Image: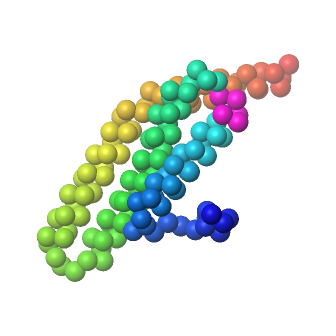
Amino acid sequence: MSNSDKTKPLSPLASEPENARRKSTIAHKVVSKLKEMGLPEDFDKDLAVLSTTIGDLWDSQKQISALLESILESSNDWNKTGDNLVDLISSLDHMNWHIENSNLSINKLAEFAYIQSSDIKSKDTE
């Protein structure tokens, strides 16, 4: 994959393997960043939850955007509009599940980040 491919926006209608690859790349970059910053192995389970959540939420927001565009661009076809709204509910439910089930892990990671930040500030003032 060339550098220009990495920054090219992905079409909402991109192939499943292409979406899966992009989704995993984004999640992996976040995991790598936190590990490079020194996140201890004790947080690996929370990091796995964060990674899965990031990937799925990124993918879901793309699906929601495509559904909204489809609703706005479609003719006055009530059946297609109904299908799009049902798909929208499904995407929102999926996002909600990830949000509810990842809060504890993400809060643990955020708390660790703030502790690290205050430790660094304390050392700077000594």
Image quadrant containing the N terminus? bottom right
- Check the image and report above or below for 17 versus 45: below
Q: Specify whether 44 is left or right of 104.
A: right
Total labels: the figure holds 0
Q: In the image, what residue occupies the spot 27% across and 57% down?
A: 88
- What secondary structure is the magenta-colored segment mainly? loop
Q: In the image, what residue occupies the spot 25% across and 58% down?
A: 87
Residue that sits furthest to the right in the current view: 126
Say if the magenta span includes residue 67: no
Q: Position of residue 102 (x, y in %)?
A: 42, 33
Q: In the image, what residue occupies the spot 83% across and 25% down?
A: 124
Colour option used:
rainbow
Question: Is residue 107 at all visible to an observer of this figure?
Answer: no
Q: Nearer the viewer, residue 120 or 97?
A: 97
Question: Is residue 61 at all visible to an observer of this figure?
Answer: yes
Examine the image and state in which quarter residue 44 appears: top right
Examine the image and state in which quarter residue 66 appears: bottom left
Q: Position of residue 37 (x, y in %)?
A: 70, 34
Q: Position of residue 60 (x, y in %)?
A: 38, 53
Q: Nearer the viewer, residue 21 or 93?
A: 21
- Check the image and report above or below for 28 versus 39: below
Q: Specify whether 5 is left or right of 91.
A: right
- Check the image and report above or below for 62 versus 51: below
Image quadrant containing the C terminus? top right
First to last magenta residue range = 35-39
Q: Specify whether 59 is left or right of 126.
A: left
Q: In the image, what residue occupies the spot 50% across and 27% down?
A: 45
Q: Position of residue 91 (x, y in %)?
A: 30, 52
Residue that sits furthest to the left in the current view: 79
